Image (spheres, grey):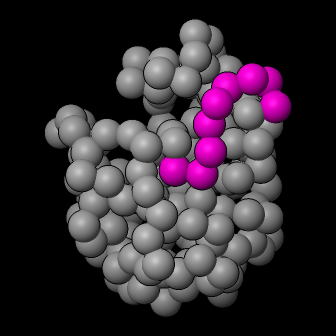
Amino acid sequence: MTGTVLQVNVSRGGIPKRAIPSGELMAAGVAGDAWRYPFHGGVRKAILLITIEGIDELASRGFPIFAGALGENLTTRGLDRRALRLRQRLAVGSAVIELTTIRTPCATLDVYGTGIQAALYDAQVHKGNPDSPRWGLSGFYASVVQPGTVRPGDAIVLPD
């Protein structure tokens, strides 16, 4: 499985996150990024990755979202969210990340419409079942295994 980085996003806290030309991925997250609430972030949730295909799917259902709207640090293109698995490592630019957990959506996302949380996440995802049609729609948190620089257009690959 391969894909590309569509956007690298940061904010001073909250959503949306805005695109930057490149990002330094470190153990604590993307340099210059912040979280409004302390339960976001930390070394196991340093990076939030979401596919543009998932964003487009939600937008086609009427939710007014776009790359960065859901608070993701990395918006990707070409990765099949349904094939991504926890503990999987991905080489992204010169960095390596490891998917650690599915993101549980919170009420902050309700600014994009009633029902967005249910559209992103269900009981099967909560149980860790990748067969759910909602698997990965809310995004994957990741730890940074190898710090590095990430830019739009960089390849995302499964390292050997």
Q: Looking at this rendering, what residue extends furthest in the top direction?
A: 114
Q: Position of residue 68 (x, y in %)?
A: 52, 50
- What main secondary structure does the magenta stretch of the protein show? loop
Residue 4 counted in the magenta span:
no
Say above or below: 82 vs 154. Answer: above
- Residue closer to the observer: 21 or 24: 21
Residue 124's spot in the image, x, y percent? 67, 22
Image quarter of the C terminus: bottom right
Query: In which quarter of the view is residue 117 placed?
Result: top right
Is residue 2 something one can see in this rendering? yes
Q: Is residue 124 left or right of residue 38?
A: right
Q: Left or right? Give the position of 18 relative to 86.
A: left
How many marks on residues? Answer: 0
- Residue at the image position 49 percent from the left and 89 percent from the top: 94
Q: In the displayed structure, would residue 154 be above or below residue 60?
A: below
The magenta segment is 60-68
Can residue 140 be seen in this snapshot? no
Asked which quadrant contains residue 135, the reply is: top right
User: Which residue is the extreme one toward the left?
Assistant: 38
Quadrant of the snapshot with the N terminus: bottom right
Residue 64 located within the stretch drawn in magenta: yes
Instruction: Name the residue rendered at 70%, 52% in the picture.
Output: 52
Q: Residue at x 53, y 81 (%)?
A: 151
Q: Is residue 29 above or below residue 121?
A: below
Query: Where residue 51 sits in the image (x, y, percent)?
Result: 67, 53
- Name the residue rendered at 69%, 42% in the picture: 55
Residue 129 position in % (x across, y down): 68, 31
